[in-house]
Image (spheres, rainbow, N blue to C red):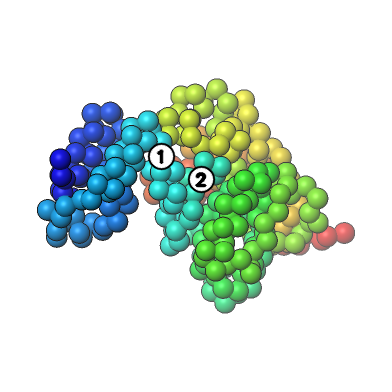
């Protein structure tokens, strides 16, 4: 039976709703657009356009994957973040709007035209680092990740965005092996979900996101205990850091960074007014002796 754009969207929405998939209206539209090679304007302006057999087959396959709760970003292989589009695979966290707090604050700290060096610990898809570099042509960055598969995704994204000449990507365990006091800004979105909580997460996260990027140990703070002193070691005097945290980790994370010697430690909130990013600076009077 033939199907037009409007029917395809209505059917997709109904199937996702019946399966209990969250956000069925938006997901249905996005999947129809991707499967049929159309835009939202096409669906509104030409709703009776007939779909080809290939388009119908591709849409059905997309919907079956979404009904199994596979993230839309994995189905399409891409996700928008800040002002860039990133390739995404099952080897990296899907970039989330909440993490854009880091990018927004970093751009306020470092005005356009000012040269600076960024270190991204746990770079994943490259979302944070590439979003900043795209906005600040005078900046250069280094991304570290323990996963070679994640680094491959970041390299592809850097090349696609024309930023490969301003970024280096290395495999490593946080900042181990790097010389200290090299960077003006250190950013990180480390694993911060407490191990027992992971099985309670939505299937899109629990079953499809890389566990290594989620599991923060028994209390979710394991990464911060390692990162706090390492980040201060990597910063130049007066350098700043921006590190994502869980919504209930403000007090513990701030305490760890203060204990490591950070100054002006505070926590930034996301658009939902949840505590999201701990920031601070290295003592500008500290020597490197």
Residue 70 visible, this angle: yes
Residue 52 placement (x, y as % from top left): 23, 50
**Mark closer to the chain start, 2 or 1:** 1
Residue 165 placement (x, y as % from top left): 64, 69
- Which is nearer the eye, 224 or 57? 57
Instruction: Look at the numbered discs 2 and 1 and tell me whether their residues touch, using CB distance below 8 Å.
Output: no
Q: State left or right for residue 246 relative to residue 7.
A: right
Residue 125 placement (x, y as % from top left): 55, 51
The residue lying at 20 percent from left, 45 percent from top is 9
Q: Which SS class for mark 1? A: loop
Q: Which SS class for mark 2? A: loop
What label does residue 89 carry, if any? Answer: 2
Residue 236 placement (x, y as % from top left): 73, 61
**Residue neighbourhood size for the residue with mark 1, other residues' Cα within 10 Å, grouped as few (<14), some (14–19), many (≥20):** many
- Which is nearer the eye, 166 or 260? 166
**Residue neighbourhood size for the residue with mark 2, other residues' Cα within 10 Å, grouped as few (<14), some (14–19), many (≥20):** many
Residue extending furthest left? 48
What label does residue 279 carry, if any? Answer: none
**Vertical relation: 133 (above or below) 68:** below
Residue linked to disc 1? 71
Measured in 3D between alpha carbons, the distance from the residue under mark 2 to the one under mark 1, in whole angstroms, is 10 Å
Q: State left or right for residue 205 relative to residue 49.
A: right
């Amino acid at each position: 039976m033939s199907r037009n754009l409007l029917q395809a969207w209505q059917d997709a929405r109904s199937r996702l709703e019946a399966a209990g998939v969250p956000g069925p209206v938006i997901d249905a539209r996005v999947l129809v657009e991707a499967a049929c090679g159309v835009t939202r304007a096409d669906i509104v302006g030409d709703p009776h356009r007939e779909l080809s057999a290939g388009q119908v087959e591709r849409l059905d396959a997309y919907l079956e994957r979404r009904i199994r709760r596979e993230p839309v970003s994995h189905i399409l292989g891409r996700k928008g973040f800040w002002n860039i589009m990133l390739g995404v695979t099952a080897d990296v966290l899907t970039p989330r709007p909440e993490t854009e707090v880091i990018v927004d604050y970093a751009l306020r700290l470092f005005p356009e035209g000012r040269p600076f060096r960024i270190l991204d610990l746990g770079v994943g898809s490259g979302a944070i680092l590439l979003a900043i570099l795209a906005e600040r042509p005078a900046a250069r960055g280094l991304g570290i990740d323990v996963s070679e598969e994640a680094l491959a995704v970041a390299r592809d994204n850097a090349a696609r965005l024309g930023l490969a000449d301003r970024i280096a990507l290395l495999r490593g365990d946080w900042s181990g092996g790097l010389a200290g006091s090299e960077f003006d800004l250190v950013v990180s979105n480390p694993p911060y979900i407490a191990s027992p909580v992971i099985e309670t997460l939505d299937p899109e996260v629990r079953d499809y996101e890389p566990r290594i990027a989620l599991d923060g140990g028994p209390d979710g703070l394991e990464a911060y205990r390692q990162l706090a002193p390492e980040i201060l070691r990597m910063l130049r005097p007066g350098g700043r850091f921006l590190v994502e945290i869980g919504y209930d980790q403000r007090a513990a994370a701030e305490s760890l960074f203060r204990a490591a010697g950070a100054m002006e430690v505070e926590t930034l909130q996301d658009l939902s007014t949840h505590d999201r990013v701990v920031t601070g600076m290295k003592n500008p009077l500290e020597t490197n002796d």
